[in-house]
Image (cartoon, helix red, strand yellow):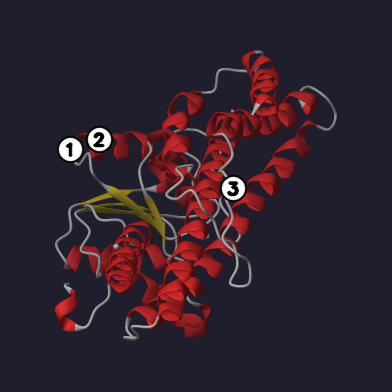
Amino acid sequence: MTKSINSLVELELLFNDRIDYAADRDSAGAYDQAFIETSEMAKLSIVDEPMATEMPDPEMARAAVELAVGTIFDVFRDTRMEEFAQQIVWGFVNSFHMTARLAEGREDDAAKKLGDLARTYDPSEIYAVELEETQMLCQTLQGCREALEAMRDHASEVYRVETGKPFQATRGSQVSKNGVTASQIAARDFLAARSRERREQLAPEGPMVLVSGGQDWHDHEQIWDRLDDIKARVPEMVLATTGMRKGVDAIAASWAAARRVKLITFVPDRKHGARAAFIRNENMLKLKPVEAVICQGSGIQSNLYELLRKARTPMHALRTANQRPDAKLA
């Protein structure tokens, strides 16, 4: 424990010399929630025995992430290598993202096994132990995933503050009279709670606002102003974009990251061939958006505009010709 305290002090001394990122003020609470220990025991694989290990100190993890990411930018700043800092840090953030997804895959496998066990009645002690240890495995992996996601989100926010661009990954708990044991009740409750949490992460609940437009759009202020106006009227909004990495979608994603608004990206499913983008548009309409911002682009935007118009969705249609001048070309 003394070693941990000393390490934390050393990290804080370095951390206090760094830029006071806006992200840091909001990240501490997220770390505290993600690094919770639900049990004194942990289990990380089916073959491992339960062990008494702790989660990392959340404050140390937070300081380490910010120090690592921020220092890369500091070292390269105002040098001939400055342009490479963004690529290196993107890889750093993406490593957290991919590791969290690997943990999620193991968690899903454990949850599937737990579900199979919870649906099978067996009064034996061997069954009860297997059920409890499988639940422990699932809980341990869930906790690790949540911690990795907290670190990824913090690192991506520092990345956004430094670059002005949001990080975008290459991919993103009855009664025994019915023959149900106490262990089964706990397992089923855990699975129900986990399912609710994952549904909210994958399909956030809230009024949906759609944004789409061309990849050569440069007037970010116009889009930010429109979205700020919508958020003032619809504070619980969830933003959905057509998932492009440039132009309107990238500007909207940057706004969502800055305003802490949940973002859903709808990427066309290439198995549909030339119809992929248009099928994607139809699927977006199934969300019953409450408002939309459509900027002039290609036939894909024209198709989405017509679908929204027929659905009588309130809409802001922005023309390319009405953009403010591009400061880079001034």
Residue with the mark numbered 3? 53
- Tell me which amino acid carries mark 3: Thr
In primary-sequence order, the first of circles 3 and 2 is 3
Q: Using the image as rendered, state which of residue 139 and residue 276 is in the foreground.
A: 139
Figure quadrant of the C terminus? top right
In this rendering, which labeled residue sits more in front, label 3 or label 1? 3
Answer left or right for 98 relative to 224. Answer: right
How far is the residue under mark 1 from the one under mark 2?
7 Å
- Tell me which amino acid carries mark 1: Arg
Give the image location of residue 29, x and y in percent: 41, 32
Answer left or right for 99 relative to 76. Answer: left
What residue sits 19% from the left and 54% below the top? Answer: 290
> Quick one: SS at disc 3?
loop
> Quick one: SS at disc 2?
helix
C-beta proximity under 8 Å, tags 1 and 2:
yes
Q: Using the image as rendered, state which of residue 158 and residue 324 is in the foreground.
A: 158
Mark 1, Cα crowd under 10 Å, few <14 / some 14-19 / many 20+, is few
Figure quadrant of the N terminus? top right
- Residue 180 found in image quarter: bottom left
Residue with the mark numbered 1? 233
Mark 2, Cα crowd under 10 Å, few <14 / some 14-19 / many 20+, is few
Residue with the mark numbered 2? 229
45 to 164, vertically: above or below: below
What residue sits 74% from the left and 24% below the top? Answer: 74
| Labelled disc at residue 65 | none
Q: Using the image as rendered, state which of residue 103 and residue 101 is in the foreground.
A: 103
Answer left or right for 131 relative to 309. Answer: right
